Image: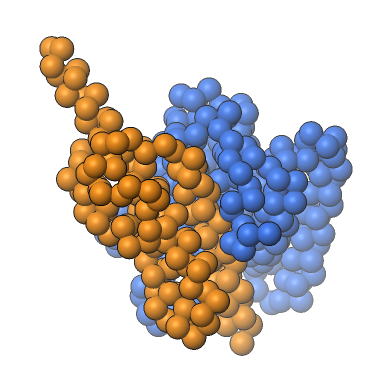
Chain colours: A blue, B orange
Amino acid sequence: MPGLLASAIWYFGVLLEVAFVVCSIWRGSFFRYFFLNLYFLFALGSGVVRYFFLTKFGVSSGEYYFAYFYTDVLLTLALYVALTSLYTRIFGELQFGKYVRLTAVLLLLGTALFSYAVVAQSEQRLSTAFAYELSQNLYFVGLVLTYILWGTVIKLRETRTRLVQFILALGIYFSAYAASYALVNLASKYSVVHIMGPIVSCLLPLSWTVTMWRHSEDSRLMTAQLVAVQR
Amino acid sequence: MMASLIFAVSVVTLLMFFVSYCRSLTAASSRHQLSWEVRDVTGISALPTGKDFVRVSQLLQLCPERPDDKTGLQAVGLYYSILNFVQRTLGRLIPALQPWTEQELAGCANFAVVILDRRIAFSREVLAQQGEL
């Protein structure tokens, strides 16, 4: 069973996910940001599934391992769709929405094929290895896509505060997650690095909830002020 | 080797997104007109400077909190600490960084002053409501 600290972080994360969904319903923005809400609803659902397998089979069981990685890949896919929805909102006014969706599907298929090609030669159990590889590669693709989206926001001088802060928070989340993954590989003997992932998971619902709560859809900001070096 | 590279790249992108996120928080407060009360309490007559942040943060602890400003303040507080660190280390090696960090520190201080202003207004409102009762 996970330790007290890990459980506390998990419960805090669940609370923040619920807070975002409740807050967006309260602010009348549930359907406006449907895919962001869907991601958190999936996160809550996967939390229930993981908890069930954890209590029934234990943390070192194959069943929990299988449930963990498959819910993880589902969550990553949901986050990828949420990111695509942010792209659609940014490019929506330029009538590029259709092309954004098509590119997102092609990129997803490409990532899945690449992940399959990597694990096909492995002797490990193919299904879980594929789930792990796809999840990891999608995180990397997500980070690159968020970076490109941020560049687009600056270039198009997007002023919608909510959208800007959602994208920045997503960028922080992807970068921090990638850093924590790398840190686990670099210094796995230190127990502190193992709780960094769960802590990072709380950042996204926390910052998105704060944005949803503090800013209305009409809030605007000057994007030029956000660039570190003024042009 | 690969993990080190991924770690380095992710820390750089993390910092870039974090700086922009904090700037998006402080940018909203840059157009706020400070009330005479907050000017009186803080002793800031024109625009706040980076050095005012610590003093204003202490004053903020004396004011009742508003539910929606705590997280933003913590993020900007962290940003202020990072900037301070950069100013004391890299800023000494690269003098060109000094004006930029000073400008950013002033933005953080302005954000804190605006929050103090809002908290003072909030406390006044609460007191007025209690008076009516």
Between B2 and B47, which is closer to the camera in this rendering? B47
| Image coordinates for residue B82, horizontal then vertical, percent | 41, 68
Classify residue B27 as left or right of residue A79: left
Classify residue B76 as left or right of residue B124: right
| Image coordinates for residue B24, horizontal then vertical, percent | 53, 49
Q: Dividing the image into 4 quarters, which one contains the C terminus of chain A?
A: bottom right
Residue at the image position 83 percent from the left and 37 percent from the top: A94
Which residue ends up furthest to the top in the rendered image?
B133
Which residue ends up furthest to the front in the rendered image?
B45
Between A135 and B64, which is closer to the camera in this rendering? B64
Residue at the image position 79 percent from the left and 49 percent from the top: A104
Q: Dividing the image into 4 quarters, which one contains the N terminus of chain A?
A: bottom left
| Image coordinates for residue B122, horizontal then vertical, percent | 27, 30
| In this view, B97 is above or below A144 | below
Residue at the image position 44 percent from the left and 30 percent from the top: A22
Using the rendered view, name the quadrant where residue A126 is placed: bottom right
Residue B69 visible? The answer is no
The count of marks equals 0
| Image coordinates for residue B11, horizontal then vertical, percent | 54, 71
Residue A85 visible? The answer is yes
Between B100 and A125, which is closer to the camera in this rendering? B100
Classify residue B27 as left or right of residue B124: right
| In this view, B126 is above or below B43 | above
